[in-house]
Image (cartoon, grey):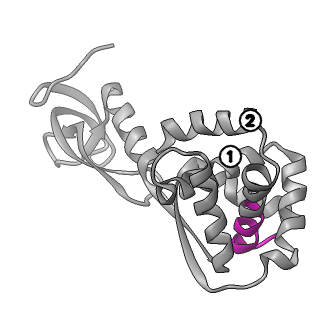
Amino acid sequence: MKIFKEGEKSRGICQTCKKLVPTTFKVTTVPLCSGKGKVDNILAAICDQCAHLVSIPQQSTPRIREIIASRKRSIEARLPRHLLDILILAGDKLEMGSPESLKDSLIRYYIAMAEEDKTMIKNIKKFSESDFAKGTSDRLSLKVNEAIYQIFEELKAKTRLSKTQIIKGLILQINQDILQKPTKKLIENLRKIMLVSV
């Protein structure tokens, strides 16, 4: 693979000029193909005639992927206070520092786990409709990457539940696994996973 440096010259087909043009590699802002957003500080070949983007070298694609992957989406829910307390207690049970900092990681992990676990999906539905899930007083704003967000959207489609109902069901699954019927193996596995996710 050829590695280009800033200021290096090349040639390429410019979509604006509609012809083969001389280009210069420059660090610039690149619009995403989706049209939703831009990525700064990317080395790209720029047309010497019209100053439009001509191409992006292969060496720049990992940086673009990383920036896209690191963008966070938000999942909002209104929850009764006791469900937020469950998250804090579950984090405390793992004995890994601040329980507050673990709560979002726990939910993200359980979203990922539910993707292929049919039993967990049934439990989420059951738990979300229980009396213990009722009430709305506090707001939870969960920041997730695009991959987790897409899994969450698939869960919504599979369960036909709202965002808040899914979050309630997940928290009550966490309650079941960590506070009500914990196993040593599960707690040890969760500690290892949380260690790398916090």
Farthest residue toward the top? 1
Horizontal side, residue 152 vs residue 11: left or right: right
> Residue 39: percent from the left, percent from the top?
31, 50
Viewer-side residue, 19 vs 198? 198
Per the image, is 177 magenta? Answer: no
Q: Amino acid at mark 2?
A: Lys
Q: Which residues are magenta?
A: 161-170
Look at 17% across and 33% down and name the residue there: 25
Up-down relation of residue 12 to residue 137 (above or below): above
Per the image, is 163 magenta? Answer: yes
Q: Secondary structure at mark 1?
A: helix
Horizontal side, residue 14 vs residue 76: left or right: left
- Mark 2 = which residue? 184
- Mark 1 = which residue? 112
Q: Secondary structure at mark 2?
A: helix
> Residue 137: percent from the left, percent from the top?
62, 86
The quarter of the displayed image where residue 27 is located: top left
